Amino acid sequence: MDDEPGPSLRIHGVIAHDIGIEIVSGARRPGEVFGGEIEASEALGVSRTAYREAIRILAAKGLVESKPKAGTRVTPRPRWNLLDPDILAWMFEGEPEPGFILDLFELRTVIEPAAAAFAACRRSDADLAMMESALEAMGRLGLAGVEGQAADQRFHRIILTAAGNEPLASLASTVGAAVRWTTLFKQRTRALPRDPLPDHVAVYQAIAEQDEAAARAAMGELLRLALADMELPDRR
């Protein structure tokens, strides 16, 4: 099998996706050793270049490690970059554990209310205009479809950017992915139980009025209600 780069550029992401799902779903357990590069690439019917690049992607996300002579093995879960948008997507392609979903919401309740309060102080007119546009799209399209869900993600990302804090803004893709996948998870067996648009409007209004306390509280309430919609067991 040759190592031509063209095919590998088309296929390595697919290989990383498939192996990534096997890892996060538990089909491949921590400590499991992969076959040799030649053996593994031949089993998958791909070039060694494609397989090698897929392993690099997974290693960058903390899912595997490769060492000379020891080969490639699945790493323990604490080493996974659980905030990576791809890993979040792979988690939700299966049936994520309720505890992991609760963890995501706990993280969001730490990040997003504070970001909303900062945004109330620091937002620009352009930020408000983008929030308005996202809200309009959410209202017009609803959250059952891909375009409405994208508008929801955009609304939350804009707030992180409007907070004017560079490390917070760097979490925008992670929060956007969490918003997307938890919304889809809520709809896996039924339609959305209620319209969450008013909760988003309340956050926007507080930010527009530059009311820090109200923005923080409104975002906290939005997240509380979103978690309640999941109907997960309370672990407190």
Image (cartoon, grey):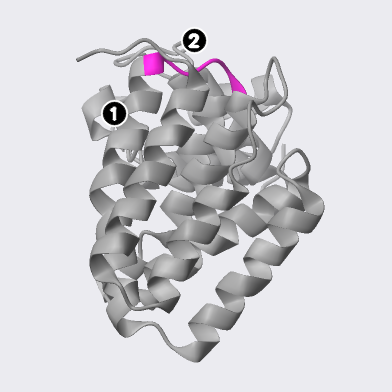
Q: Where residue 171 sits: x, y (%)?
A: 36, 59
Q: Is residue 101 above or below residue 221?
A: above
Locate residue 38: give its quadrant: top right
Whichever of callouts 1 and 2 sits on the residue coming sooner in the sequence is 2
Give the residue at mark 2.
Answer: 27
Magenta-colored stretch includes residue 96: yes
Numbered tag placed on residue 69 in the rendering: 1
Numbered tag placed on residue 119 in the rendering: none
Q: Is residue 128 above or below residue 186?
A: below
Q: Which residues are magenta?
A: 93-98
Q: Residue at x 37, y 10 (%)?
A: 233
Q: Nearer the viewer, residue 67 or 130?
A: 130
Q: CA distance from mark 1 to mark 2?
A: 24 Å
- Which element carries disc 2, helix, strand or loop? loop
- Which element carries disc 1, helix, strand or loop? loop
**Amino acid type assigned to the residue bearing label 2 in the image:** Ala
Locate residue 196: give its quadrant: top right
Give the label, 1 or 2, closer to the camera: 2
- In what quadrant of the picture does the N terminus appear? top right
Residue 24 in the figure: left or right of residue 110: right
Q: Residue at x 27, y 72 (%)?
A: 118
- In what quadrant of the picture does the C terminus appear? top left
Q: Few, some or many C-alpha atoms within 10 Å of disc 1 (few <14, some 14-19, many ≥20)?
A: few
Task: Report whether residue 6 is seen.
Answer: no
Q: Where residue 26 sits: x, y (%)?
A: 44, 12
Q: Is residue 129 above or below residue 81?
A: below
Locate residue 64: give its quadrant: top left
Magenta-colored stretch includes residue 133: no
Q: Residue at x 52, y 55 (%)?
A: 200
